[in-house]
Amino acid sequence: IFDGKREKAYDLYRVVPLRENLWAISEVGKTVMYVINGKDKALLLDTGFGMVPLKQVVHELCGEKPLMVANSHGHLDHNSGNNQFDTVYVGRYDEPDSHDAVAEGTKERICRDFYQEFFQEGGVVPGTWKPGPAPHILTLEEGDRIDLGGIALRVLECPGHSLGSIALYEENLGWLFTGDLILTWEVWGQLPRSSTLRVYGESLQRLAGLEPGVTTVFPAHWEECRNPLKLPEFQLPPRVLSMYAQGTQRVVRGEEEGVAYPFRGMDARCSFFEIGGMVFDPKRIG
């Protein structure tokens, strides 16, 4: 798990050191969580689908110090392991989505939609997999500061992919954690509880304003087969911020129509960038 090699299709999870006191946890190669280790306490950002024994992993990395758990947003591929913890923080506008139980039908859909290759290659779902919400949900909002001791992250409210999406910015180190707001492939800005594209674009413009101080952007998904520029694993260059902001603004201004993007019967479209792209509902430009 800790050897730094790329995962095989049947590996349940893999822990990859990225910086001193920073690790990525890749769950079945589909979703990415981050562990940040401060002098006084640690932070786990996102809990994935809930298959990883997260307490054990964080303990092995950070020792016995207090642990804070936060979600970048309220979607089930980022918060289904919340029930491994007593308290989890989330952006205030995704709080209503953070209490939903994961029904058996939803578990079956997760396995069907995300884990086909995992099962084909001999992967096994652990018998302990019982995804669900944490007993206590607390909210984060713009300007909140998460001080871990020597590492401090500022909360940025970034409505877009979801209404309550947040980014976390460590100004001294230049680390920016963006959840699903920015990826190496097209992000989904067309979901029923996504913001309008105009609001999403405003969030991206705010992040682009940080670009001079950002050293690395850390997204919440990574697949090597969808990394055509062969960027370092789990790491995006700062220029992706202005790339996304400018590309989205072209759509908002009517300068770019995008191409058809079939999605669950929706008339969605997508504008592709050098890195990634933006899927949008042309009826919800805003």
Image (tube, helix red, strand yellow):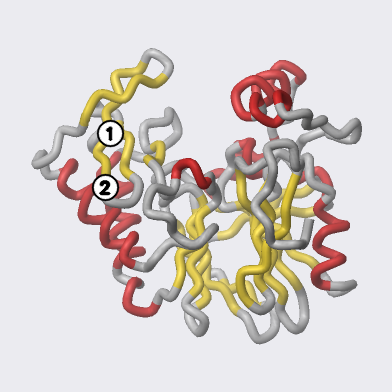
The structure residue drawn at horizontal position 48% and vertical position 57%, both measured from the top left corner, is 178
Label annotation for residue 270:
1
Residue 68 location (% of width, % of height): 74, 64
Percent x, y for residue 234?
A: 54, 58
The quadrant holding residue 281 is: top left
Looking at the picture, tell me which residue is in the foreground, 257 or 15: 15
Q: Residue furthest top?
A: 265
Q: Residue at x 83, y 71 (%)?
A: 66
Would residue 70 be visible to someone looking at this image? no
Q: Which residue is mark 2?
A: 273
Tell which of 157 and 78 is nearer to you. 78
Please tell me whether mark 1 sits on a helix, a strand or a loop. Answer: strand
Q: Secondary structure at mark 2?
A: loop
Q: Quadrant of the N terminus?
A: bottom right
Instruction: Give neighbour class at mark 1: few <14, some 14-19, many 20+ (Cα, 10 Å).
Output: many
Side of 41 where 167 appears, left or right: left
Please name the residue shown 69% across and 62% down the image. 4
| Residues under numbered marks 2 and 1 in contact, where contact means CB atoms less than 8 Å apart | no
Count neighbours of disc 2 (C-alpha within 10 A) and say few if under 14, some if 14 to 19, many if 20 or more: some
In the picture, measured across the screen, residue 249 lies left or right of residue 80, that is left
**Spot occupied by residue 195 in the image (x, y as percentages of width and height):** 37, 40
Q: Is residue 153 above or below residue 191?
A: below
Q: Residue at x 83, y 52 (%)?
A: 86
| Residue kind at label 1, given as amino acid type | Cys
- The label nearer to you, 2 versus 1, is 2
Q: Quadrant of the C terminus?
A: top left
Residue 24 seen in this snapshot: yes
Q: Is residue 130 left or right of residue 120?
A: right
Quadrant of the image occupied by residue 44: bottom right
